[in-house]
Image (cartoon, rainbow, N blue to C red):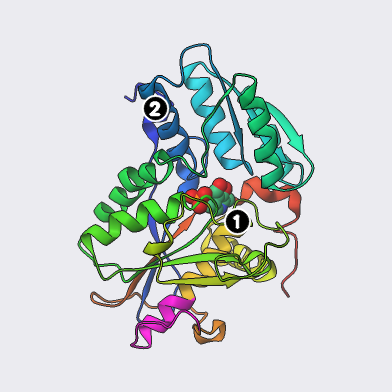
Amino acid sequence: MDESVLDTVGSPLVRVDGPSEATVAAKLESRNPGGSAKDRPARAMIAAAEASGELQPGDEIVEPTSGNTGVGLAVAGAAKGYDVTIVMPASKSPERRQLLRAYGATVELVEGDISDARERADELEATGMVQLHQFDNPANPRAHYETTGREILDQLDGHAPDALVAGVGTGGTVTGIGRRLRESFPEVDVVAVEPTTNAVLSGGEPGADEFQGMGPGFVAPNLDTDLLDGVLTVDLDTAEAECRRLAREEGILVGQSSGASNVAARRVAAAFAAGERPDYRSVALDDWEPRPTAGAADGDPVVLTVFWDSGERYMSTGLFEDDDG
Ligand SMILES: Cc1ncc(COP(=O)(O)O)c(C=O)c1O
């Protein structure tokens, strides 16, 4: 028996359809107690702030977030007895607001994007609330290093991964997992995924904040860019079509950042399966085989990705209502 719901953090690594002669495997993070990968950094940032004395009983936590970190903090706050205020762009899905309120958090909506939410959270911090600063806090990538990365090593069952391909918000996930994998597999490629319309890692200008949680429009300090071998971009329509395909053909319900990550992971897997280490500036989307494999053999390339949360969190956006024909 676990002492607390916070002790149930952890998720399965599941093979998804990929090109022939390769394995694509995704960490299904919706299985965490608050339903997303962000339960891990939320729990870790609170523990670090408690250990440093910055967070004490009776303190109130504030954080700007596109949603999932907020839910993670609301869960941990409820379990540990802290009041939590979440500052969130009004454009993020209504399910997240409802969830936050269900866990007893106060939700403050701001017009604009995550940068506007950060400004408002700074103001609230100045009134005495404790802000955990997920974009800078080293406990964020460390949580993924210590839990997600370590779990993947166990779940790989001795297979050597060729690449980690994952979306970037704060950068905590790709940095933490990437660092842990690199220690055991120095050759593994670490590839970031960002929205086509907000491709700042690829050298573009900040643009539309269309994805929930991916592509904040700036390079977060928690993203270790030295770790990256490449950056791939995926547009929203392609990501959403992939979410519908995953739901209908594989029984896996996820949101847009996961769909985007899977599209990119399949492209990378196809390039590896074709026999070469991919040149990430020219991995063509059309190169991958859309049909499932009969099962990759031992020794075939292994590409890892992350599915951050469940598609249930995006129902109201109409994501699953499109008819792809
Ligand atoms: C749905 C979703 N996808 C992707 C990410 C990106 O994760 P990270 O902040 O670890 O880069 C987040 C982060 O909040 C998210 O909520």
Label 1 CB-ligand 1 distance < 8 A: no
At x 51%, y 32%, the residue is: 132
Query: Seen from this angle, which residue lies furthest top?
Result: 58
The magenta region covers: 267-281
Is residue 282 found left or right of 156 in the rendered image?
A: right
Across and down, in percent, residue 298 comes to 23, 74
Residue 105 is at least partly visible in this image: no
- The amino acid pointed to by label 1 is Phe
Task: Looking at this view, name the residue that lies furthest to the right.
Answer: 111
Which quarter of the rendering shows the C terminus? bottom right
Measured as percent of width and height from the top left, residue 45 is found at 44, 33
What label does residue 218 carry, if any?
1
Please say whether residue 184 is one of the residues in the magenta stretch: no
Which residue does the numbered mark 2 point to in the structure image? 47
Q: Amino acid at mark 2?
A: Ala
Q: Is residue 272 rendered magenta in the image? A: yes
> From the image, which quarter does the N terminus lie in?
top left
> Residue 204 sits in which quadrant?
bottom right
